[in-house]
Image (cartoon, rainbow, N blue to C red):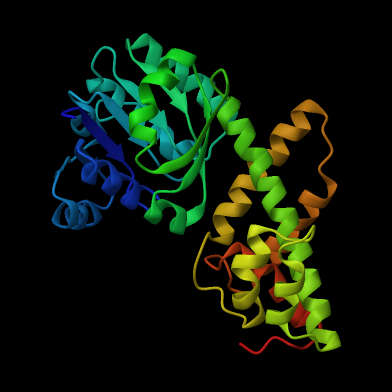
Amino acid sequence: MGQRCSFIGLGVMGYPMAGHLQQQGFDVCVYNRTSSKAEQWVNEYQGCRADTPAQAAADADFVMVCVGNDDDVRSVFYGEDGLLAQLKSGAIVIDHTTASADLARELDTAVTQHQGEFLDAPVSGGQAGAEKGILTTMVGGEQATFDKAQPVLNCYAKKIVRMGEAGKGQLAKMVNQVCIANVIQGVAEGLHLARKVGLDPDALVDAIGAGAAGSWQLVNRYRTMWDQEYDHGFAVDWMRKDLGIAIAEANRHGAALPSTAMIDQYYAEVQSLGGSRWDTSSLMVRLDKLAGDWEK
């Protein structure tokens, strides 16, 4: 292919996503705030690493960003070391961070002022989806930019949908997180009842998992939830950050998210129990503790 990509942010998602790009023929230069992680990536995938986002973005045709929150995104975009400082004319910047829609619109304006093009493209599918290259991405931005970005996005996403103009990708991700949180609470309560009435969890999920009660969360998380194993997956801290963004956006539009707000507080309880880095399926911990079934 010969096109140059930079990837900024090598967390549990960005690290394998950047790896897929390098493995599929792109020339990838990475930046990570902790340089040892960037060195590890280069040793595993080859490619190169940069000392600043600006250095990473220099001469890149595509610049991908996948960091923590709005402030983290701004820190790698702006300033003399920010990616905008060295962005070449015509480059496409794709922000995979789950962040606010307001930030996406801000970045779209900033990138355009630097003669580049911008897409907000938050992803869903977790670490496993990133490692397998089967993520879902919800994209905001111009149709022409979206079309040009397809070869890049196809390296690590199996479902790529343009939602509309800049910011719409982030709005779709908010809906995604609201749905996930509410499904997890339902699965937790269902499994809690199953434990109390003496049902076999494997037989239960075999029976109901393919019907109307079926969900990714039920099928992929029931066993670890039953066994009280949560040191994996998408961390509670990050889910609370995402739900906070969704609730704030809902408030601005007069949309009511009562159960989501309640579940956000349930996650706060999990954090208080030491579960900040536990998988989001750890909502069941509250129920196990209340019932005296928590064994950890």
Of residues 71 and 193, the one drawn nearer to the viewer in this rendering: 193
Q: Is residue 113 above or below residue 44?
A: above
Residue 286, position as x, y percentages in the image: 74, 74
Which quadrant of the figure has residue 61? top left
Which quadrant of the figure has residue 207? bottom right
Of residues 230 and 148, the one drawn nearer to the viewer in this rendering: 148
Do we see residue 12 in this rendering?
Answer: no
Q: How many marks?
A: 0
Of residues 157 and 206, the one drawn nearer to the viewer in this rendering: 206
Q: Is residue 138 above or below residue 126?
A: above
Which quadrant of the figure has residue 81? top left
Q: Is residue 112 above or below residue 70?
A: above
Of residues 61 and 57, the one drawn nearer to the viewer in this rendering: 61
State left or right for residue 279 relative to residue 148.
Answer: right
Q: On the rendered image, what quadrant is the N terminus found in?
A: top left
Instruction: Name the residue located 73 percent from the left edge and 61 percent from the top edge.
Output: 214
Instruction: Name the residue located 71 percent from the left edge and 61 percent from the top edge.
Output: 184
Instruction: Name the residue located 43 percent from the left edge and 13 percent from the top edge.
Output: 144
Q: Is residue 248 above or below residue 197?
A: above
State left or right for residue 84 relative to residue 273.
Answer: left
Residue 177, position as x, y percentages in the image: 65, 47
Residue 287, position as x, y percentages in the image: 77, 76
Q: On the rendered image, what quadrant is the C terminus found in?
A: bottom right
Residue 166, position as x, y percentages in the image: 53, 20
Instruction: Name the residue located 37 percent from the left edge and 9 percent from the top edge.
Output: 113
Do we see residue 175 in this rendering?
Answer: yes
State left or right for residue 177 relative to residue 212.
Answer: left
